[in-house]
Amino acid sequence: MGPADLLPKSVLSSPASARRRVAAIAAAASAACALAGCWFRFGDGLAIRTSLGLTSAVFGALTLHVALGAKSAWGAALRALGVSTVLGTASIVLPSAFVAGDEHVPFMACVVFGAFFGAFTGFVYGLALAALAGLTWRDVRAFTHEGADHAARTAAVWSLFPIAIATMTTLLYDAQEHVPEWASERTRAAHAVAVPLGVAGFLVALAVVCAAFVVAELRLVRRRRWIAEVIGDDPRWSVRAASPHDDLASLPRLRDGGHVLEYQGEESAYRVAANARPVAIL
Protein backbone atom coordinates (compact mmCIF):
# COMPACT_ATOMS: atom_id res chain seq x y z
CA MET A 1 0.00 0.00 0.00
CA GLY A 2 1.47 3.32 -1.09
CA PRO A 3 1.22 6.63 0.79
CA ALA A 4 -1.57 7.87 -1.49
CA ASP A 5 -3.70 4.83 -0.55
CA LEU A 6 -3.92 6.11 3.02
CA LEU A 7 -5.39 9.43 1.89
CA PRO A 8 -9.08 10.02 1.09
CA LYS A 9 -9.71 10.10 -2.65
CA SER A 10 -11.67 13.32 -2.23
CA VAL A 11 -8.51 15.27 -1.31
CA LEU A 12 -6.39 13.98 -4.18
CA SER A 13 -6.05 15.76 -7.48
CA SER A 14 -3.64 15.12 -10.37
CA PRO A 15 -0.63 17.45 -10.42
CA ALA A 16 0.64 15.80 -13.60
CA SER A 17 -2.55 16.77 -15.45
CA ALA A 18 -2.67 20.40 -14.28
CA ARG A 19 -1.29 21.68 -17.57
CA ARG A 20 -3.82 19.65 -19.55
CA ARG A 21 -6.71 20.95 -17.43
CA VAL A 22 -5.72 24.57 -18.01
CA ALA A 23 -5.21 23.85 -21.72
CA ALA A 24 -8.68 22.29 -21.97
CA ILE A 25 -10.29 25.41 -20.52
CA ALA A 26 -8.30 27.59 -22.91
CA ALA A 27 -9.48 25.38 -25.78
CA ALA A 28 -13.14 25.76 -24.80
CA ALA A 29 -12.88 29.55 -24.47
CA SER A 30 -10.98 29.91 -27.76
CA ALA A 31 -13.51 27.76 -29.60
CA ALA A 32 -16.40 29.80 -28.18
CA CYS A 33 -14.85 33.00 -29.50
CA ALA A 34 -14.20 31.49 -32.92
CA LEU A 35 -17.72 30.07 -33.26
CA ALA A 36 -19.11 33.48 -32.28
CA GLY A 37 -17.21 35.06 -35.16
CA CYS A 38 -14.57 36.94 -33.15
CA TRP A 39 -12.20 37.37 -36.10
CA PHE A 40 -11.87 39.42 -39.30
CA ARG A 41 -14.73 38.17 -41.45
CA PHE A 42 -13.35 38.17 -44.95
CA GLY A 43 -15.60 35.13 -45.31
CA ASP A 44 -18.29 33.53 -43.20
CA GLY A 45 -20.55 30.51 -43.09
CA LEU A 46 -21.00 27.11 -41.50
CA ALA A 47 -17.81 25.57 -42.91
CA ILE A 48 -15.62 28.53 -42.01
CA ARG A 49 -16.95 28.92 -38.47
CA THR A 50 -16.77 25.23 -37.63
CA SER A 51 -13.26 24.91 -39.05
CA LEU A 52 -12.10 27.97 -37.10
CA GLY A 53 -13.84 26.65 -33.99
CA LEU A 54 -11.99 23.35 -34.23
CA THR A 55 -8.61 24.86 -35.06
CA SER A 56 -9.00 27.49 -32.33
CA ALA A 57 -9.72 24.78 -29.76
CA VAL A 58 -6.65 22.80 -30.81
CA PHE A 59 -4.42 25.84 -31.13
CA GLY A 60 -5.63 27.34 -27.83
CA ALA A 61 -4.81 24.13 -25.98
CA LEU A 62 -1.46 23.81 -27.75
CA THR A 63 -0.55 27.41 -26.93
CA LEU A 64 -1.12 26.89 -23.20
CA HIS A 65 0.58 23.49 -23.17
CA VAL A 66 3.72 25.00 -24.72
CA ALA A 67 3.60 28.20 -22.69
CA LEU A 68 3.32 26.48 -19.30
CA GLY A 69 6.57 24.67 -19.97
CA ALA A 70 8.48 27.95 -19.63
CA LYS A 71 10.83 28.67 -16.72
CA SER A 72 8.97 31.71 -15.38
CA ALA A 73 5.53 33.30 -15.40
CA TRP A 74 6.71 36.08 -17.70
CA GLY A 75 8.33 33.53 -19.96
CA ALA A 76 5.05 31.62 -20.11
CA ALA A 77 3.12 34.79 -21.01
CA LEU A 78 5.55 35.79 -23.77
CA ARG A 79 5.67 32.27 -25.12
CA ALA A 80 1.86 32.14 -25.26
CA LEU A 81 1.74 35.42 -27.14
CA GLY A 82 4.30 34.28 -29.70
CA VAL A 83 2.84 30.81 -30.25
CA SER A 84 -0.69 32.18 -30.58
CA THR A 85 0.41 34.70 -33.20
CA VAL A 86 2.08 32.00 -35.28
CA LEU A 87 -0.85 29.62 -34.96
CA GLY A 88 -3.25 32.43 -35.81
CA THR A 89 -1.47 32.72 -39.14
CA ALA A 90 -1.77 28.97 -39.68
CA SER A 91 -5.47 28.97 -38.82
CA ILE A 92 -6.44 30.76 -42.03
CA VAL A 93 -5.45 27.86 -44.31
CA LEU A 94 -8.80 26.01 -44.17
CA PRO A 95 -10.96 29.17 -44.32
CA SER A 96 -8.89 30.33 -47.29
CA ALA A 97 -9.71 27.11 -49.11
CA PHE A 98 -13.43 27.64 -48.50
CA VAL A 99 -13.31 31.29 -49.60
CA ALA A 100 -11.29 30.41 -52.69
CA GLY A 101 -13.89 27.82 -53.67
CA ASP A 102 -16.88 30.09 -53.04
CA GLU A 103 -15.47 33.25 -54.58
CA HIS A 104 -13.50 31.56 -57.39
CA VAL A 105 -10.24 33.30 -56.52
CA PRO A 106 -6.73 31.77 -56.28
CA PHE A 107 -6.16 29.86 -53.06
CA MET A 108 -2.70 31.36 -52.49
CA ALA A 109 -4.10 34.86 -52.86
CA CYS A 110 -6.53 34.10 -50.04
CA VAL A 111 -3.72 32.67 -47.91
CA VAL A 112 -1.47 35.70 -48.39
CA PHE A 113 -4.35 38.10 -47.79
CA GLY A 114 -5.60 36.19 -44.78
CA ALA A 115 -2.16 35.66 -43.20
CA PHE A 116 -1.96 39.26 -42.02
CA PHE A 117 -5.42 39.18 -40.44
CA GLY A 118 -4.82 35.71 -39.03
CA ALA A 119 -1.59 36.84 -37.38
CA PHE A 120 -3.28 39.88 -35.88
CA THR A 121 -6.21 37.80 -34.64
CA GLY A 122 -3.79 35.27 -33.17
CA PHE A 123 -1.97 38.13 -31.44
CA VAL A 124 -5.24 39.41 -29.90
CA TYR A 125 -6.18 35.91 -28.75
CA GLY A 126 -2.61 35.57 -27.51
CA LEU A 127 -2.99 38.55 -25.20
CA ALA A 128 -5.75 36.74 -23.33
CA LEU A 129 -3.92 33.40 -23.42
CA ALA A 130 -0.74 35.10 -22.18
CA ALA A 131 -2.66 36.40 -19.17
CA LEU A 132 -3.91 32.88 -18.46
CA ALA A 133 -0.42 31.40 -18.78
CA GLY A 134 1.04 34.00 -16.44
CA LEU A 135 -1.72 33.57 -13.87
CA THR A 136 -1.55 29.78 -13.71
CA TRP A 137 2.17 29.11 -14.30
CA ARG A 138 3.16 29.09 -10.63
CA ASP A 139 0.38 26.72 -9.57
CA VAL A 140 0.98 24.36 -12.49
CA ARG A 141 4.73 24.26 -11.94
CA ALA A 142 4.34 23.66 -8.19
CA PHE A 143 3.35 20.06 -9.03
CA THR A 144 1.09 19.87 -5.98
CA HIS A 145 -2.48 18.66 -5.62
CA GLU A 146 -3.54 22.04 -4.32
CA GLY A 147 -1.68 23.86 -7.07
CA ALA A 148 -3.42 21.79 -9.75
CA ASP A 149 -6.85 22.70 -8.38
CA HIS A 150 -5.89 26.36 -7.93
CA ALA A 151 -4.75 26.48 -11.56
CA ALA A 152 -7.99 24.94 -12.83
CA ARG A 153 -10.09 27.32 -10.73
CA THR A 154 -8.10 30.34 -11.91
CA ALA A 155 -8.45 29.25 -15.53
CA ALA A 156 -12.20 28.81 -15.09
CA VAL A 157 -12.58 32.34 -13.72
CA TRP A 158 -10.33 33.73 -16.49
CA SER A 159 -12.49 32.07 -19.15
CA LEU A 160 -15.47 34.21 -18.20
CA PHE A 161 -13.78 37.13 -19.98
CA PRO A 162 -13.45 35.57 -23.46
CA ILE A 163 -16.81 33.81 -23.08
CA ALA A 164 -18.43 37.18 -22.28
CA ILE A 165 -16.87 38.70 -25.41
CA ALA A 166 -18.15 35.79 -27.51
CA THR A 167 -21.63 36.15 -26.03
CA MET A 168 -21.75 39.90 -26.68
CA THR A 169 -20.62 39.34 -30.27
CA THR A 170 -23.45 36.87 -30.80
CA LEU A 171 -26.20 38.81 -29.04
CA LEU A 172 -25.23 42.41 -29.83
CA TYR A 173 -23.94 41.93 -33.37
CA ASP A 174 -25.07 38.77 -35.14
CA ALA A 175 -28.52 38.63 -33.52
CA GLN A 176 -29.12 42.32 -34.31
CA GLU A 177 -27.72 42.30 -37.83
CA HIS A 178 -30.26 42.91 -40.59
CA VAL A 179 -29.78 41.06 -43.87
CA PRO A 180 -30.86 43.24 -46.81
CA GLU A 181 -33.21 41.86 -49.45
CA TRP A 182 -30.55 42.02 -52.12
CA ALA A 183 -28.11 39.87 -50.10
CA SER A 184 -26.80 36.71 -51.76
CA GLU A 185 -27.82 33.22 -50.72
CA ARG A 186 -24.34 32.69 -49.28
CA THR A 187 -24.73 35.75 -47.05
CA ARG A 188 -28.18 34.62 -45.93
CA ALA A 189 -26.88 31.13 -45.14
CA ALA A 190 -23.97 32.57 -43.14
CA HIS A 191 -26.33 34.80 -41.16
CA ALA A 192 -28.67 31.87 -40.46
CA VAL A 193 -25.97 29.83 -38.72
CA ALA A 194 -24.19 32.69 -36.92
CA VAL A 195 -26.38 32.85 -33.82
CA PRO A 196 -26.89 29.07 -33.41
CA LEU A 197 -23.15 28.44 -33.64
CA GLY A 198 -22.41 31.28 -31.25
CA VAL A 199 -24.91 29.94 -28.73
CA ALA A 200 -23.58 26.38 -29.14
CA GLY A 201 -20.02 27.56 -28.48
CA PHE A 202 -21.18 29.48 -25.43
CA LEU A 203 -23.05 26.49 -23.96
CA VAL A 204 -20.20 24.02 -24.51
CA ALA A 205 -17.60 26.40 -23.08
CA LEU A 206 -19.79 27.23 -20.11
CA ALA A 207 -20.34 23.53 -19.37
CA VAL A 208 -16.60 22.80 -19.49
CA VAL A 209 -15.74 25.81 -17.35
CA CYS A 210 -18.44 25.18 -14.73
CA ALA A 211 -17.44 21.52 -14.40
CA ALA A 212 -13.77 22.44 -14.03
CA PHE A 213 -14.52 25.13 -11.44
CA VAL A 214 -16.88 22.98 -9.34
CA VAL A 215 -14.54 19.98 -9.27
CA ALA A 216 -11.53 22.13 -8.35
CA GLU A 217 -13.39 24.10 -5.70
CA LEU A 218 -14.83 20.99 -4.07
CA ARG A 219 -11.39 19.38 -3.86
CA LEU A 220 -9.88 22.52 -2.36
CA VAL A 221 -12.61 22.77 0.28
CA ARG A 222 -12.52 19.06 1.15
CA ARG A 223 -8.72 19.02 1.34
CA ARG A 224 -8.64 22.07 3.57
CA ARG A 225 -11.24 20.61 5.92
CA TRP A 226 -9.64 17.18 6.06
CA ILE A 227 -6.18 18.55 6.84
CA ALA A 228 -7.62 20.75 9.58
CA GLU A 229 -9.45 17.76 11.08
CA VAL A 230 -6.53 15.33 11.12
CA ILE A 231 -4.08 17.89 12.43
CA GLY A 232 -6.35 19.17 15.16
CA ASP A 233 -8.50 16.24 16.33
CA ASP A 234 -7.26 12.88 15.07
CA PRO A 235 -4.44 11.37 17.16
CA ARG A 236 -3.68 8.83 14.42
CA TRP A 237 -2.10 11.62 12.37
CA SER A 238 0.74 14.01 13.10
CA VAL A 239 2.70 16.71 11.31
CA ARG A 240 6.41 17.42 11.56
CA ALA A 241 9.02 19.40 9.68
CA ALA A 242 10.60 17.62 6.74
CA SER A 243 14.11 16.26 7.29
CA PRO A 244 16.96 15.33 4.91
CA HIS A 245 16.20 11.64 5.59
CA ASP A 246 12.69 11.84 4.13
CA ASP A 247 12.09 10.40 0.68
CA LEU A 248 10.03 13.41 -0.37
CA ALA A 249 9.96 12.42 -4.03
CA SER A 250 7.83 9.37 -3.21
CA LEU A 251 5.21 11.31 -1.24
CA PRO A 252 2.12 13.03 -2.65
CA ARG A 253 2.56 16.79 -2.51
CA LEU A 254 -0.77 18.01 -1.18
CA ARG A 255 0.66 21.48 -0.61
CA ASP A 256 3.87 23.29 -1.44
CA GLY A 257 5.22 23.36 2.11
CA GLY A 258 8.01 21.94 4.21
CA HIS A 259 6.05 19.66 6.51
CA VAL A 260 5.34 15.94 6.40
CA LEU A 261 2.01 14.41 7.32
CA GLU A 262 2.49 11.09 9.15
CA TYR A 263 0.10 8.24 9.85
CA GLN A 264 0.64 6.41 13.14
CA GLY A 265 -1.68 3.47 12.53
CA GLU A 266 -5.16 2.29 13.45
CA GLU A 267 -4.09 -0.09 16.23
CA SER A 268 -2.93 2.60 18.59
CA ALA A 269 -3.34 6.30 18.44
CA TYR A 270 -0.28 6.66 20.66
CA ARG A 271 2.40 4.78 18.75
CA VAL A 272 5.85 6.29 19.01
CA ALA A 273 6.90 8.72 16.34
CA ALA A 274 9.62 6.36 15.12
CA ASN A 275 6.92 3.98 13.87
CA ALA A 276 4.90 6.70 12.12
CA ARG A 277 4.65 6.42 8.39
CA PRO A 278 5.18 9.51 6.17
CA VAL A 279 2.15 9.91 3.91
CA ALA A 280 2.17 13.35 2.27
CA ILE A 281 3.86 16.71 2.06
CA LEU A 282 2.02 19.74 3.41
Image: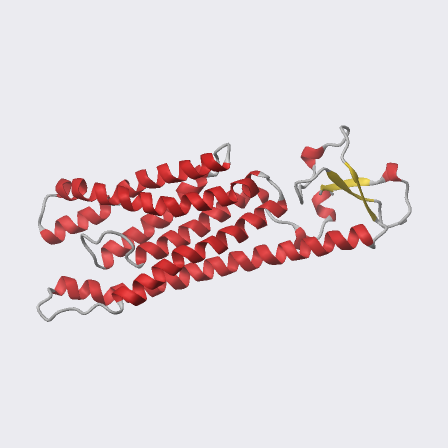
Question: Which x, y percent locates residue 196?
Answer: 30, 66
Left or right placement of residue 27 versus residue 102 in this view: right
Question: Which x, y percent locates residue 260?
Answer: 75, 40
In the rendered image, the vertical position of residue 162 relative to residue 114, given as above or below: below
Asked whether residue 2 appears in the rendered view, the answer is: no
**Quadrant in which the C terminus is drawn:** top right
- Between 1 and 73, the residue placed more toward the observer is 73
- Between 52 and 68, the residue placed more toward the observer is 68
At 36% from the left edge and 57% from the top edge, which residue is drawn?
32
Q: Using the rendered view, name the quadrant where residue 114 is placed.
A: top left
Asked whether residue 89 appears in the rendered view, the answer is: yes
- Between 235 and 275, the residue placed more toward the observer is 235
Question: Which x, y percent locates residue 231?
Answer: 79, 50
Left or right placement of residue 233 versus residue 224 in this view: right
Q: Using the rendered view, name the quadrant where residue 183 is placed.
A: bottom left
At 58% from the left edge and 50% from the top edge, which residue is drawn?
149
Left or right placement of residue 83 versus residue 233 in this view: left
At 40% from the left edge and 50% from the top edge, which residue is drawn?
27
Residue, far bottom: 181
